[in-house]
Amino acid sequence: QRPLWSPDGKQVCFARHEGSKILLWLRDASTGMTRRVTKRELPEYDASWSPDGKWIAFASKRHGGWDIFVAPSDGGAAQQITWHAGAEFPGGWSPDGKQLVFAGRRDSPNYALYTVDLKTFATGRLCEDYAAMNYPSFAPDGKTVVYGRYGFPWTRPRYTGSAAAQIWTVNVADGRRKPLTSDDRQHL
């Protein structure tokens, strides 16, 4: 889990191993006070701040598989926002804070990028691909999403070859995709 600054720069969200669990914590940058984001004793990680800093999305295994939840950053109960057998991890929030983008596999052997509406919990598919899709994030104008296609984890940053991670974008309105990188090097 990468540590993440809150949008106002006053807190840092991070994951900490506690025995066999990975739990999310917040640390106040000025006072050094640390508190847990949630109270569950389950693996929870891959946090993402809402643009207004009021919510933190994260993945949890509360009901067996990896689903996405959101919790108020000032404390309170987390709410589940995805329900699917596949593993789903939060990506970035839309600039208006109304949607969250994530990668997953649903009802197909292919990977896809999805959005979930945080008011209705309705999901929509942006695009689908046979190659793994990772770490999606909205552009500041909300019109495109950038993501990683293919690739190995950060532990193999110098890998070169046909399976190297490439950076792609997808147009939110029409699903058209295009590569930003197209060589045999890892773009993480």
Image: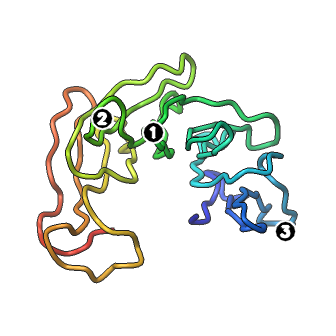
Please tell me which residue is depicted at 53% across the width and 33% down the height of the picture.
Answer: 97
Label 1 crowd (10 A; few <14 / some 14-19 / many >=20): few
Looking at the rendered structure, the kind of residue marked 3 is Gly
Q: Position of residue 140 (x, y in %)?
A: 39, 44
The disc placed on residue 23 is none
Please count the marks in the image.
3
Q: Are marks 3 and 2 in contact (CB under 8 Å)?
A: no
Separation of residues labelled 3 and 2 (CA atoms): 37 Å
The residue where tag 1 is placed is 86
Looking at the rendered structure, the kind of residue marked 2 is Lys
The residue where tag 2 is placed is 143
Position above or below: 49 against 4 = above
Closer to the camera in the image, 45 or 118: 45
Q: Nearer the viewer, mark 3 or mark 1?
A: 1
Separation of residues labelled 1 and 2 (CA atoms): 27 Å
- Does 28 sit left or right of 166 as displayed? right
The disc placed on residue 32 is 3
Q: Position of residue 38 (x, y in %)?
A: 78, 46
Label 3 crowd (10 A; few <14 / some 14-19 / many >=20): few
Please tell me which residue is depicted at 39% across the width and 69% down the height of the picture.
Answer: 153
Indicate how the structure is coloured in the image: rainbow
Please tell me which residue is depicted at 80% across the width and 42% down the height of the picture.
Answer: 74
Closer to the chain start, of discs 3 and 2, is 3
Q: Secondary structure at mark 3?
A: loop
Separation of residues labelled 3 and 1 (CA atoms): 37 Å
Q: Position of residue 58 (x, y in %)?
A: 61, 46
Closer to the camera in the image, 137 or 63: 63
Q: Position of residue 66 (x, y in %)?
A: 55, 44
Looking at the rendered structure, the kind of residue marked 1 is Gly
